[in-house]
Amino acid sequence: MTSTTYGHGVVPGSPEREGADASGTAPVRDRPLLSYRSYIGGEDTAGEGWVYTISSRSLLEDVFSSISLKRELERNPDSPSAEHPYVVGRVAAATTEEIDLSLEAAAQAAPRWAMVPLEQRLELGALFRETLLANRQTFLDMLVAEGHPVKLARWELSCLLEVYCPESIGWYHKRMHSECEYRGRRLISRRAPDGVVCLNPPQNAPAPSAALAVLAMMAGNAVVVRAPRSIPLSTMYVLRDLVAPLLEKIGAPPGTLNVVCSNPRQTMDRWVESPFVDDIFYIGGSEEGMRFQAKAIANGKKPILELAGNDTIAVWKDADLEKAAEAITESFYGSGQICMVPNSVLAHPDIADALIEQIKIKVRGIRPGYPEDENVLLSPVRRSEKFFGLLNQALEGGAELICGGHRMELDGTPSETGVFLEPTVLRVDGLPRARELEVVQKETFFPLIPVVVPELVPHNEMRELFVDYINSNAYGLRNSLWSGSPRVIDQFVLRVVNGGLLKVNDSHIGFLPYLPSHGGTGLTGGVFGEANYPMLKTSHLQGVSVSAEAISPYKAVFGDDED
């Protein structure tokens, strides 16, 4: 069996940098295999078998060898195929017993960790940010190895750097604890940790999502994170190699952080049924998320949902069309397989034609390629049947194809068998027609965006129409407005209540301090949906009154009789 490195390993690069043999013989690894065990109660535990991560680049270079390699390792995890340089690393699959032990370890740690002063817990966020910066390249290499274009990997890193920046941590501190003096009393408004928080990150962005567990720990909770079986390596790297040593450094009790790679259904069922679990942070699709919400509530758990997005960019008639088009093309980043990219455009009829021309220009810069290529923004789409189903339904419903609509190869050449999809833009005239199309109604998760052009109506009615259109969206993650009119902007800010975030004349997906990176209403966040600050969502508000000296309870209730 190949030699291994358990944690704190070196992230592998592409086969060319690792001794791939061009002679046709099997290439041999020239480095230890990066491996992770389950992490429970401060210890690495054995697990049962291994889950292997195959370099995403291999799917573009030699898809058949990549698939056969993965199947061989799934059948026989100890196969010599693990020596192949396409194999990035492996993570131990957790047993049922280990899933239960992780919950017990968290339950034992939670009350001890909650007693640690807030200021000390907040140090974790600052230290994590420093550690991310110190390990920036390794973090990016890990995401690229899992298929994230390097530009988007940097964007994902920027999210974490803003979430844990000094300004944001200062804002969290004020919301977690505030005090004032009143008539000889010290009045405290504070948020207390919920206890044990379980987090289920998604397959499309596991490591950045799993890193939000740090916020739950800063709130005073102990956490259990499930690393997705299909793509667990980056999650284990971030939590085991970067976060776990920081917890030890600041004196957190063992069990404050636990990470297992396990079957999703089995794990979620045990979380829901466990008496140790208080909150479950679920990231996934809306239909599955709503079913999970009902099950969690029925079992006394707080569901924290981060589900699909179906975001709208509204472009008013006085907008900067070039910059608006630039924001609209964010829809194609990662081939649309990111929940917070725009999913539809609402364009004022006066500028619709000009806006579409600008979009066509900007789309030319969105191209496929290897994920480590600096100019690549598209990702492979492995199952594209639904894309063509949505496209055909829209065209049959009266939409006009502006550009795209085909598969393409690595170099951008149109192809019937390519693993990439062209950035595709549709025009849909009339709101009644638009509301009938699934491409408008639902999140598509493809590089496919409709530009909806409403009927021309008087100015004041058009403003009402725009606001009502956005507020009537069944989803509610992010919304954007592009306008040069202060009055229009003020109306949107005042009246658009759908969504967890509203951006005006700005990047739709860019991150900022203070503001939430996630969260929303409707099918995005469920019945408790709102802007998602994980520190606040995994804690609950308490009021405290501390009198400087004993006060008469009677007078406190009824006041001075002489009054």
Image: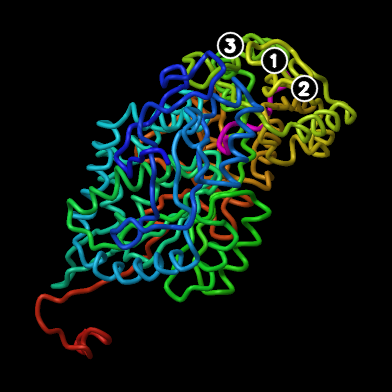
Question: Vertical placement of 447 versus 75: above or below?
Answer: above
Q: Amino acid at mark 2?
A: Arg
Do the numbered discs 2 and 3 sit on residues whose CB atoms are within 8 Å?
A: no
Q: Is residue 240 magenta?
A: no
Residue 289 percent coordinates (x, y): 62, 56
Look at mark 1 in the image and give the residue it sits on: 356
Q: Viewed as shown, does residue 321 lie left or right of 93? A: right
Q: Disc 2 to disc 1, how far (Cα)?
A: 8 Å
In what quadrant of the picture does the N terminus appear? top left
Of the image marks 1 and 3, the number of the one nearer the N terminus: 1
Does residue 534 appear in this view?
yes
Residue 78 percent coordinates (x, y): 50, 45
Q: Viewed as shown, does residue 304 lie left or right of 285? A: left
Is 480 in front, or is 203?
A: 203
Question: Vertical placement of 117 versus 56: above or below?
Answer: below
Residue range (magenta): 338-349
Look at mark 2 in the image and give the residue it sits on: 427
